[in-house]
Amino acid sequence: MDEIKNVAKILKNSKQAVALTGSGISTGSGIPTFRGKDGLWNKYDPEKFTMEYFMKNPKDFWSTAKNLFLPLINAFPSKSHYVLAELEEMGIIKAVITQNIDGLHQKAGSKNVLEIHGNGKKLKCLLCGEEYEIENFIDEINKNNVPLCKKCHSILKPDAVLFGELLPKKTYLNSIYYSYTADVMLVIGTSLLVEPAASLPFSAKENGAKIITINLEKTPLDDLADYILKGYSDEILDKILNEIKNL
């Protein structure tokens, strides 16, 4: 409990606290992680989620991808998402950098969200750049048809970043900025095995930030972290928030 109190004080007194989140923060929303024993990559072949595969086999891509992207439409934020949104409203969290594509931070009320891997609930035309909400194409996708742009009739891809695809430049540059200027970084529910996101906490640490990890398992950051909080993020973040309110 002393660690929770110390973390609460650090966050309360911070000037530029930032959160970096991974798929572990959304397990409370019923969205499985990508890695680990029950991870999505044990169920689906990641080779089918490359940009090259999408371009060559869009129909086959969508027949599999629908199982990952369509469930995001009706997913609800977890307690963790709501806590981070409240911490932002309190002026403590300045930005949420997320590897997640589920849009649940925004759904919970977070305003400054940097989705470095894109958003799986949106579609984008590779030809004309038109953007759509995936829920407008549910019937087409469920029929195993390739969703087409209503403007130019080219194929649509998820706005989520596929393997072999560049990260959204502006978003990633902003995430670097917030990492370099952070005085505290909360690292929540990420295995830190995917670059370049995995390097962001190390950059923050090198520039003097205190690092607080919240995870069920050990991460490559544990040797450098100032505080390592093992457990479910929903429970830990709720305790931290309540402690901050009591300060």
Image (cartoon, grey):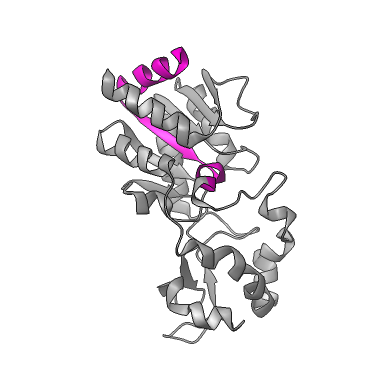
The front one of 129 and 193 is 193
User: Can residue 14 be seen at all in this image of the molecule?
Assistant: no
Q: Position of residue 8 (x, y in %)?
A: 37, 21
Which residue is drawn at the image coordinates 74% and 54% (left, top)? 42
> Magenta segment range?
1-27
On the picture, is 38 further left or further right than 206?
right
Quarter that holds the N terminus: top left
The front one of 31 and 120 is 31
Which residue is drawn at the image coordinates 49% and 61% (left, top)? 72
Quarter that holds the C terminus: top left
Magenta-span inclusion, residue 3: yes
On the picture, is 57 further left or further right than 149?
right
Q: Position of residue 107 (x, y in %)?
A: 36, 54
Q: Position of residue 36 (x, y in %)?
A: 70, 44
Which residue is drawn at the image coordinates 40% and 36% (left, top)? 178
Which residue is drawn at the image coordinates 62% and 74% (left, top)? 62
Q: From what the image shows, is residue 192 above or below residue 105? A: above
The front one of 176 and 44 is 44
On the picture, is 79 further left or further right than 232?
left
Q: Position of residue 169 (x, y in %)?
A: 47, 53
Magenta-span inclusion, residue 6: yes
